[in-house]
Image (cartoon, helix red, strand yellow):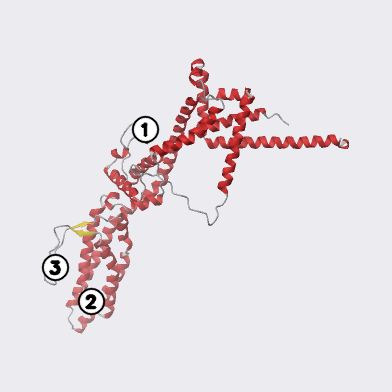
Amino acid sequence: MPNLKMLDSLIAIVGVILVLSLIVQSLQGALKKALKIKSRQLEDSLLDLFENALGQPRVTTQGMVASSPILRLLLARKHPSTQAAPEVQALMDAVSAKFKDVGRVAQSGRWILDSLSKDDLLKVLARVAPGTLLPALPARLLDVCEQVDQLASELAAVQGAALSGQASAQLARLRQAVDPLINDVKAIYKVKAGNAGQGGLPPGAPQPVMPKELDPTLLVGDALRLREVRLEDVLTVLTELQKEVDRDLTARQQAGQGTEALEAASTALKAIATHITDLHAKLDLAIAPLRNRLSSVEVWFDTVMQSFAERYARGMRTWSLILSLIVVVTLNANIFTIAGRILSDDATRNRVLQMVEQEQALEKAQATKSAKPADAAGATAPAAETPQTVQGLVEDTRKAVAPDVVLYTSLGFGRRGRADLMSNPVGTLAGWLAMTMLLSVGAPFWQDTLESLFGVKNLLRKNADIKNVEQRSGEGNPKAT
């Protein structure tokens, strides 16, 4: 059987590194939850997204503190959105309020974004006030309202009784096509307070023009639905109606009959055509920029989220290095001292190997248990994660870290840190830095490495067993030689 001492030593060293990596991983997870690191990074990325989508100048964040949401939090610095353009600030405030409304809020009352998809963001933007996404939109929508009022008045002035049967049918089609738009537009505004109650006008008298204002509950989604009526189809119906009225007018003129009602209807239809053309232009002026801004959000989303993923990964690597250094110094995890002791002390090596094998067996048993399909009758939906208080988070972290710390110190490591530093500062610092770099790689990497090493060890043992069997078979059968 081959000498597996070096392989066992390597497995033991990797096992110690894995234990320390699990401590760092637990501390990193607690830090992410306590400081809401991902949410704050997403918030910064959302600010970048709105600045690009709205075409506003980007807030310049100079220095490490200004560009790091965690350092800003720890040093009580203001969020960059406070320095952004007013349009961007208003949109950030509106979006954060909507996310709070749908329950994305921490116990502190602050909005939180552990994840953000493009569809979620677009749904939220459809629920904000139109002026928040496009400040010029309210004034343009009021112009649309005035144009629709004029169109409705002109359409009501057309007397259907004076038209022929075919023309009356076309008039009914025209009103059926225009009424949805008129009703939708009337639903988005209201008469200003103090101007209502001017009744008592005689029948047929012109109604006074009332000052209007947009309904404060109007949303972006409501404004977008105004463009669903195809005014091109309305103009087609209007053209056919105009032809019918002109034919009737010509026929009456030739018959020497009265044409006043038809002439009035023809004049009103021409005015309606003008109002529809103007309405089409004003709707495009109001809604097209709104659609463009939403499209710009879609276009910039993937680019900004990719930048977020890169920044978040870099930030977590930095925090991993910091936490690794803290763990290494606290536990005096000098890689050279640990490796030297494992290589030279058989008892320590065997104790570490036994610990590693027990941990591997326990993890495999847990993985097998969790992989078993749940019974159909007993299967239940996973419980929703409940928010944790700071005290609860600290307690959970302590429970997760304590067993690994005890396991590490029980192997005889983690002592005389200050004494080692005083007696051999260069070697101790070099060992600490080397271990810090190893731990920053992450526990999953060392877990995979450990499993690979055990696989190599099992393969060597299997080959050695086969070779021994063949040798014993050859010794018992002289003809084999």
Q: Nearer the viewer, residue 135 or 14?
A: 14
Between tags 1 and 2, which lies in front?
A: 1
Among the 4 quarters of the image, the one containing residue 288: bottom left
Tags 3 and 1 in contact by the CB under 8 Å rule?
Answer: no
The residue sitting at 43% across, 49% down in the picture is 384
The Cα–Cα distance between marks 3 and 2, rounded to whole angstroms, is 19 Å
Q: Amino acid at mark 3?
A: Pro
Quadrant (top left/top right/bottom left/bottom right) for the C terminus:
top right
Q: Position of residue 395 (x, y in %)?
A: 43, 36
**Mark earlier in primary sequence (1, 2):** 1
Label drawn at residue 71: 1
Q: Residue furthest right?
A: 479
Q: Position of residue 81 (x, y in %)?
A: 31, 40
Q: Amino acid at mark 1?
A: Leu
Label drawn at residue 206: 3
Q: Nearer the viewer, residue 114 or 29?
A: 29
**In the visual, does 408 lie left or right of 27?**
right
Q: Which residue is mark 2?
A: 160
Q: Amino acid at mark 2?
A: Gly
The Cα–Cα distance between marks 3 and 1, rounded to whole angstroms, is 66 Å
**Mark earlier in primary sequence (3, 1):** 1
